[in-house]
Image (cartoon, rainbow, N blue to C red):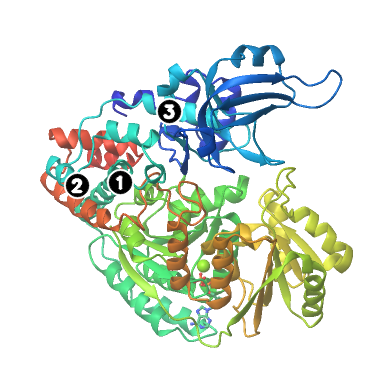
Amino acid sequence: MRPSILDPLFAPVTTLAGVGPKLGKVLDRFLGDETRPARVVDLMFQLPTGAVDRRPSPSIADTPIGDVATFTARVSEHRPAPAGKKAPYRIIVEDETGDVTLVFFHADSRHLVQTLPIGAYRLISGKLELWEGMRQMVHPERILDPKLAATLPAFEPVYPLTEGIGQRMMMRTVQAAAERCPEMPEWQDPAFLAKSDFPSFHQAVEALHHPVDRKAAEGDTVARRRIGYDELLASQIALALVRRQQKKIAGRATTGDGGVRFRIQSALPFELTEGQRKAIADIHADMARPEKMLRLLQGDVGSGKTVVALMAMAAAAEAGRQSVLMAPTEILARQHAERLAPLAEKAGLKLALLTGREKGAGRKQVLAGLADGSIDIAVGTHALFQEGVAFYDLALAVVDEQHRFGVHQRLLLGSKGEAVDVLVMTATPIPRTLSLTWFGDMDISILSEKPAGRKPIVTRAISSERYDEVVGAIGRAVESGAQAYWVCPLVQESDTLDVAAAQERYDALRDIFGDKVGLLHGQMPGREKDAAMAAFVAGETRILVSTTVIEVGVDVPNASVMVIEHAERFGLAQLHQLRGRIGRGSAASTCLLLYKGPLGPIAEARLTIMRETEDGFRIAEEDLRLRGEGEVLGTKQSGSPDWRIARPEIDGDLLAAARDDARLLIERDPHLETPRGQAIRVLLYLFERDVAIRLLRAG
Ligand code: ADP
Ligand code: MG
């Protein structure tokens, strides 16, 4: 149960004064997800991305032009719009050094006469421009009686916005949320706090949303570091609890005679790479030990992780035990099942597919096979771990493309069998700093080389103005037998963003290439997705227009061309994942990054890196560096762990401290019973690492 001290923070945002159902919906879309509405805590943890400087200038002559200016002046003249004309209402304000024309369109003149009476002094703040040589301000953002000057903060935090809410409303709402923050029991070590000059959590939250200067608003403060450290500590404690739990559960030794593995290896159309052999050996050694395996297999896209998984599952089967392979998407689960089925068959293993879509008699049959042990390997989505799925004797769970799963899901994996060995496979090359925070509890195997014979992918960045040329080139490639992916960022054309919609591109390309073109996107019904994928795999369609649903795992070796539209909108990690879909066969591959200029410096840097390298590790490091420079901080980006406040790339020192602190703490107070332990429980709930608390009860 969540400690009641946190109740005000976990209430829906509509419990805040001034947030009605309409604004509530806007915020739900922005900060909530399918399972829950936006909550006060989600607002409280919104980080400002900067600040508006509203420090007053000493006089009008000193005001900055082209920026937000704040000054005190006397109202000297009203120039209402002439009757019947569309001209704005103008008001002149002045001091000894100059004047400023305030401009109001569609003005309510009664209101203006009241707020800006002639002769009165007013504190005015807004964007100041020069217009025909005169200072003017269109719609001042703030107009105050100078007596109330103290209520105008010198630096006003600026928050990420979404459609339907403006800056001022967002600021008020976030600040109202922050005011809900109670005084918390201190969960940090007092000596560490003193040494780091960290404020209390409560003070830190307040400081976060009331920055005293621009630097503070950009997060460069002890306040943000303090809360970031809280978050890192919460995650490290969750990991420490998992690790402790893992160690306590004795695993079962799984050993076999090598027969199944031998049959699979002989059926493979290729030689295993050195890295694959080593990883397979590591895994078999883990499985043979009477402890639970918790291993991460890290290998860049195309490095051949799937066959490693198969060899692990083969060892389980030799021992007469079952395994599951869990994929993050329906498409990928099906692809794995299709790929592995022939090999499994040759080795005499029974393989079944189970996703949310297997229904009725088929599903019953699979469930029965899992329960009576006649199925050796189950491939599927997270449906594999839902209630009602029981295994005869589950030995091994393989989770593919881990970056889509959180620590939480990982904890659930173990619940389907006593001491299930867990192998997590990720294609995201994770820089060391991050791998510590995600996988601090795991052993790691790395596939550093790609299978032999791969040709480098030629990557080019091309302005979208050259669309026709690109279409021509695709036509020629298809003509000569190649297959191509054409990736679009969003499914539906949106009015506000000129995103190239997959549907629209599909129609356009179909006009040219006819039924050689297929379409695949996340909103299609499952059967249509399968059909689209199958047609492309079979080579019936030659160009697959798709959204990023193909980002993860899809493997069609004959596809050697990829066009990514609006490449400037993707993060580096995502571009790398997408591009990893080609360059898998023996043909030379080409990736065309279509961009719409003008490019910002970060987008340009991303495209340059993509052209320069295919090395996933370098790309990941660069990605972290670019993001560290502030473009998307505080917002969700695909491929990044969902830190709310911490920035592992600049808080690296804190990360190591948090890990050490967490391990020590769990050693001394394994059940979180001391006063600090009790406070730590609050911390875990606050950052939603509370699944770890359930482990306390389990043991
Ligand atoms: P990923 O690591 O991205 O999941 P896959 O397991 O999908 O990579 O493998 C990519 C492709 O490489 C597949 O077509 C697979 O059959 C092939 N492959 C895997 N291992 C080897 C190898 N040792 N030699 C040649 N091809 C291989
Ligand atoms: Mg894969």
Residue 548 location, x and y as percent? 63, 58
- Tell me the quarter of the image containing the C terminus: top left
Label 2: element kind: helix
Q: Are marks 3 and 2 in contact (CB under 8 Å)?
A: no
User: Which amino acid type is shown beneath numbered disc 3?
Assistant: Gln
Badge 3, how many Cα within 10 Å: few under 14, some, many 20+? many
The quarter holding residue 179 reads top left
The tag on residue 225 is: 1
Mark 2 vs mark 1, CA separation in Å: 10 Å
Label 1: element kind: helix
Badge 1, how many Cα within 10 Å: few under 14, some, many 20+? many
Determine if residue 33 is in view.
Answer: no
Residue 361 location, x and y as percent? 61, 47
User: Which amino acid type is shown beneath numbered disc 2?
Assistant: Ser
The quarter holding residue 425 reads bottom left
Q: Are marks 2 and 1 in contact (CB under 8 Å)?
A: yes
Residue behind label 3 places its C-beta within 8 angstroms of ligand 2: no
Residue at (53%, 64%) from the top-left corner?
572
The tag on residue 196 is: 2
Of marks 3 and 1, which one's residue comes earlier in the chain?
A: 3
Q: Is residue 438 above or below residue 5?
A: below
The tag on residue 175 is: 3
